[in-house]
Amino acid sequence: MTRRKEIQLLFWMELFFVGILWLFTFFGKISDLTFWIVLFAILVVDIFFFIVLYHEGKEIEKLSFDMNRILNGDYSIGIRDYEEGDISNLKNDIYKMTIKLREQVEQSRKDKKYLEEILSDISHQIKTPLTSMYVINDLFLEDQNMAFDLKREFLLKNRMQLERIEWLVSSLLKMSRLDSGVEPIKKRKIKSSELVQSVIEPLKIPIELKEQTLEIVNLKDPLLWVDPNWTREAFVNMLKNAHEHTPEGGVLRIEVNETPLYFEFLISDTGCDISKEDLPHIFERFYKGGGSKESIGIGLHMAKKIIMMQQGDIKVVSSSKGTTFNIKFYKKNY
């Protein structure tokens, strides 16, 4: 006997009604002709009902087959239905679920590829200073009577490599917190003078040691709507880049402007220019230009990411007179 509940229920109901009908006929309550007419009508309804059930069964069977294909990773199935009915509604719901699953799988693949790339880049970045440190350690082991000045020089080089690794790890942790949303963008009002002061504070001593001049032009001192911590991080990275690529006695400049459409920050230097080949790539993760041997190549990438996450814009222009980073925060986003 069939296992479908609808058919079982229909069978017992019809058996009950046919029995009642037969009893009425047996006791002469209805004629034989009426009995056969009613029985024929019941058979017609049965045939129609079985046809509908058969069609729905085939639809459900096909739907089950398509769902198994989806579960096995085939998201190219088109199961949308523009008709009315419960089966059509179910098909449309499954179609929506398929689209969402496909998007999640695509995002998962992108995340996996991104993770593979960043792990490969990190491995490469850490390998270089570690190799240098291994060489220096081997020199110490081979030459027990090494001169003090030479030892000091090698130890200073080792310290530089350790600082490089520390900067790399610290920057990557900051980027991971930003990407994962652990420390999301939290905008609040802050004066541009307050932001600029927080940017130059950690770089005052390095700038003084290179006898560089830092000029601040902030005539209007506008009130900004940004995340102070992350924006400071972005600006420090850009000013640090300008400081590192400007020779002793050079000039660094931070200029703040306001227009009816946006707030503008210009961070410029009088250092060496960026080549035309390097200019389109300087914001790429771990990209190091031809004249940047000690750079890790993550600071500017993080700076652009922070600015873009606040619906800002960042551009860079470079010439023989120096380099300028142009950052804009549009007022329509405030």
Image: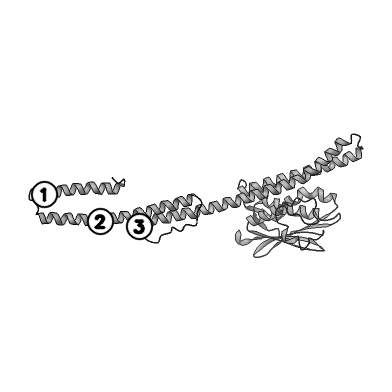
Q: Nearer the viewer, residue 292 or 73?
A: 73
Give the colour scheme of this rendering: one colour
Tell me whether the residue at label 2 lies in contact with that at label 1, contact meaning CB atoms closer than 8 angstroms: no
Q: In the rendering, at what x and y percent does residue 91 appear? A: 41, 55
Question: Number of callouts in the render?
Answer: 3
Q: In the rendering, at what x and y percent does residue 169 appear? A: 71, 44
Q: In the rendering, at what x and y percent does residue 147 appear? A: 92, 37
Q: Secondary structure at mark 1?
A: helix
For disc 1, the marked residue is 24
Please give the label number shown on residue 57.
Answer: none
Residue drawn at point x = 14 percent, y = 55 percent: 36
Horizontal side, residue 53 vs residue 240: left or right: left
Q: Amino acid at mark 2?
A: Ile
Tag nearer the camera, 2 or 3:
2
The single residue placed furthest to the front in the displayed view is 1
Q: Which of the two discs, 2 and 1, labels the residue nearer the N terminus? A: 1
Q: Nearer the viewer, residue 215 or 292?
A: 292
Q: Amino acid at mark 3?
A: Gly
